[in-house]
Amino acid sequence: MGIRQGYPVQPERERCILVGVDVTPRGEWSVDESLDELERLVETDDAVCVGRLTQRLASPYPKTFIGTGKIDELRELAEATEATTVIFDDELSPSQQSNIERMLGQKYKVLDRTALILDIFGQHATTHEGMLQVQMAQLQYLYPRLRGMWAHLAKDKTRGGIGSRFGQGESQLEVDRRLIRDRMSVIRRDLAKISQNRDVQRKGRVESQTYRVALAGYTNAGKSTLINALTGSDVLEQDLLFATLDPTTRALELPGGRNIVVTDTVGFIQKLPTTLVESFKSTLAEVSDANLILTVVDAHDEHSDKQLGAVNDVLEEIGASTIPRVIVYNKVDLMEPDDVDAMRERHPDAIFISAKTGAGIDALIAGIAEIAASRDVTGAYRIAYHDAKLVDLCHERGNVIEQVYDEAGITITLTAPPELASMLERYRVS
């Protein structure tokens, strides 16, 4: 049948089978829960899940991850469902991936969770820095897998005959490895320059004594919606995993006139690839340099406690586990009131909000202001008229209580953050 003119043809969605290993003892996530999340990742990548296969093991097989009998079962399932791609829920070693592809046959593409997440990041990166970070992670993932990708050429050498003396498989492998090493070196240099610029910006915020709040949370917890609700900005909001990757910093004026900054960055997920954590190090530094972290949790998600645990693991990995934190349960508008009350009893120190409807946002801002003020110092300072620019600084960064003029200068009483109070110490009056 011919294609009708004037009608766009939608590309056929990739048909995927998900494979998980139920290792004993298991972590917090069951194999089914983890595969549910993997399926959401597949849907985010615009593919469709057509089947699942699991196996209970004490530990994965070193050569094939799952048993050879299960691979036969996997091939039969792929044929029955007309699948084109097999995705494992855990990261495969290069040799495991190569062995599985060989045993399944060349018609099937074999990927793991890491490759899937890297592909999603590649689609969602929009800034130059984001694209470089993703490309670096992809190359780091690809580099050790090159040998398996060129194995079919290496085999040709053993057959003898024309061309067998040139060693084309090994030559192509070395060429590709060199090209990847060269490209990674260029990306590292470019990322180092961007990181230096970001460090200068962060240093400027630190030196200005601006109070810094960072949003951290599981992907799709509603961080972008929250920063919009807090600051009135227009950061992209989408009901997708990893919809936003690039850090966004916005100003927020607290009650009393104090100005702070709020930063949103990439969402976390269980089994977040280490290559991504490494590549996004300069971006994640926005979190580790904060004065306060708001850990945003999707209260409506049945796995909210497990997601919170995954976020805490990543915060510890990037060296941010000692920074003061407030847990913010979002999306309470999707819950029954009795369920919200029960969750409040279990988490009395948390703040419950709906970033979408605005419920609880004022309480959250008041909580941020209280925590920011807990570090502050109240005192009186006599400032000479020739240093009057310090008075402007007091109004900008502190909360001025009283201001009196006399012949000696300006006596100003205020509550100031520790950095400003230290700067004013020599003007202090008892």
Image (cartoon, rainbow, N blue to C red):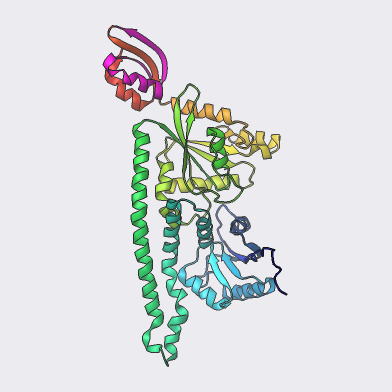
394 up-or-down from 231: above or below? above
Magenta segment boundaries in residue numbering:
378-406
Q: Is residue 110 magenta?
A: no
Q: Quadrant of the C terminus?
A: top left
Furthest residue to the bottom? 161
Q: Position of residue 366 (x, y in %)?
A: 53, 26
Badge count: 0
172 up-or-down from 302: above or below? below
- Relative to residue 429, is residue 341 drawn left or right? right
Asked if residue 27 can be seen in this view, the reply is yes
- Relative to residue 51, is residue 237 drawn left or right? left
422 up-or-down from 379: above or below? below
Q: Quadrant of the N terminus?
A: bottom right
Q: Position of residue 299 (x, y in %)?
A: 62, 41
Q: Toward which corner of the image does residue 422 lie, by quadrant?
A: top left
Q: Position of residue 118 (x, y in %)?
A: 50, 59
> Which residue is drawn at the image coordinates 45% and 90% (left, top)?
159
Q: Toward which corner of the image does residue 42 lie, by quadrant?
A: bottom right
Furthest residue to the top? 407
> Which residue is drawn at the image coordinates 46% and 74% (left, top)?
148
Asked if residue 66 can be seen in this view, the reply is no
Viewer-nearest residue: 178 or 35: 178
